[in-house]
């Protein structure tokens, strides 16, 4: 199984913080484009890049418009973005991340939701017991999906479990989650519905009345976003995405290690973490 490591640049909890990725050979790569969608060909097990460990609040994400797509913190109105603690949820309630080599095409209207994609790799909520680390690459079994409609865009949320989780063998489809982890799916819908309300935004909406689709449906969605990504990285379509990569010889955006290293070293040197603002620990209570 391929292994990956990360290199920090800048100071955590700052605007200049970046987390760059390296492969087992120590070569710089893009977690978006160079980590394969499948850890092993022919199996419906997927790689997942962990952007946000469970229980944390910082909204970290693969920087889709930056060279080599490091993980950085989302910024709104010049300020670092943290999700609120909306009672009873503390930060993110799963390990949250993305499946590499997928892309939700903003020019494609989904036949199921009637909305276009959100211009990002497909999101994953990993529901295992281990709290993962930021930048960790894990292998997951897909169990189902929820279709969030976020400001008019389709934003699929894949429900998955780490293949190394003690309960992974018992979880094979979305109904198994209801049996083995009762309340988790309902909490997931509640979280996505209300997480932007403290910012003054309305509750989010869902396709399919907020019902989860099963494993087969979810895998079909993932495979379709993988095809959209293939078109993107070979310049057959345009999504205002930085496709710089170091391993895809058929991509016009493939660069050598010298240029990749220059990209990383141009970022500020790593430093001590800034303090997280005190207001991040505040709790918000809403009428259910």
Image (cartoon, rainbow, N blue to C red):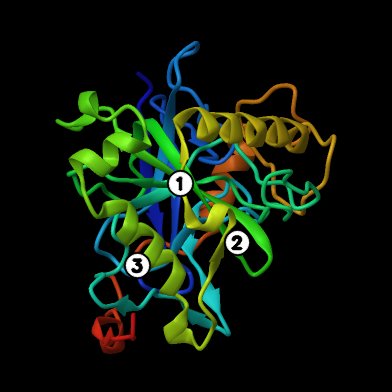
Q: Is residue 102 above or below residue 148?
A: above
Please tell me how many numbered marks the rendered image carries: 3
Rendered location of residue 39, percent (x, y): 43, 21
Location of the N terminus (image quadrant): top left
Quadrant housing residue 21: top left
Quadrant housing residue 181: top left
In this picture, residue 77 sits left or right of residue 277: right
Q: Secondary structure at mark 3?
A: loop
Q: Is residue 205 above or below residue 129?
A: below
In this picture, residue 234 sits left or right of residue 216: right
The residues tagged by marks 1 and 3 sit, at their Cα atoms, a distance apart of: 35 Å
Disc 2: which residue: 149
In the rendered structure, find residue 212 and report the number of the disc placed on it. Answer: 1
State the residue lying farthest toward the front: 209
Badge 2: residue crowd in 10 Å (few <14, some 14–19, many ≥20)? many
Rendered location of residue 142, percent (x, y): 41, 32
Disc 3: which residue: 12
Rendered location of residue 165, percent (x, y): 20, 32
State the residue lying farthest toward the top: 42
Residue name at image x 49 percent, y 13 percent: 41
């Amino acid at each position: 199984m391929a292994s990956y490591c990360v290199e920090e640049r800048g100071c955590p909890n700052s605007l200049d913080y970046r987390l760059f990725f390296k492969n087992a050979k120590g070569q710089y790569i893009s977690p978006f484009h160079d980590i394969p969608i499948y850890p092993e060909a022919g199996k419906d097990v997927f790689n997942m890049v962990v952007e946000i460990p469970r229980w944390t609040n910082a909204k970290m994400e693969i920087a889709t418009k930056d060279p080599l797509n490091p993980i950085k913190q989302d910024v709104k109105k010049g300020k670092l973005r943290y999700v609120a603690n909306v009672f009873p949820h503390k930060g993110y309630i799963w390990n949250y991340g993305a499946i590499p080599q997928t892309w939700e095409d903003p020019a494609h209207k989904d036949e199921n939701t009637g909305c276009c994609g959100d211009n990002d790799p497909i999101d994953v909520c990993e529901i295992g017991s281990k709290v993962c680390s930021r930048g960790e690459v894990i292998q997951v079994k897909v169990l189902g999906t929820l279709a969030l409609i976020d400001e008019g865009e389709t934003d699929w949320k894949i429900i998955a479990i780490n293949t190394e989780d003690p309960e992974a063998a018992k979880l094979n489809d979305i109904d198994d989650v209801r049996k083995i982890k009762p309340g988790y799916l309902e909490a997931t819908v509640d979280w996505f519905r209300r997480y932007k309300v403290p910012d003054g935004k309305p509750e989010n909406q869902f396709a399919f009345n907020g019902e989860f689709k099963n494993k087969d449906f979810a895998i079909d969605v993932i495979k379709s976003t993988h095809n959209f990504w293939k078109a993107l990285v070979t310049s057959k379509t345009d999504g205002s995405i930085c496709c710089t990569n170091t391993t895809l010889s058929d991509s016009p955006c493939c660069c050598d290690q010298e240029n990749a290293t220059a990209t990383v070293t141009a970022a500020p040197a790593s430093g001590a973490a800034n303090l997280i603002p005190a207001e991040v620990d505040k709790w918000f209570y809403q009428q259910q």
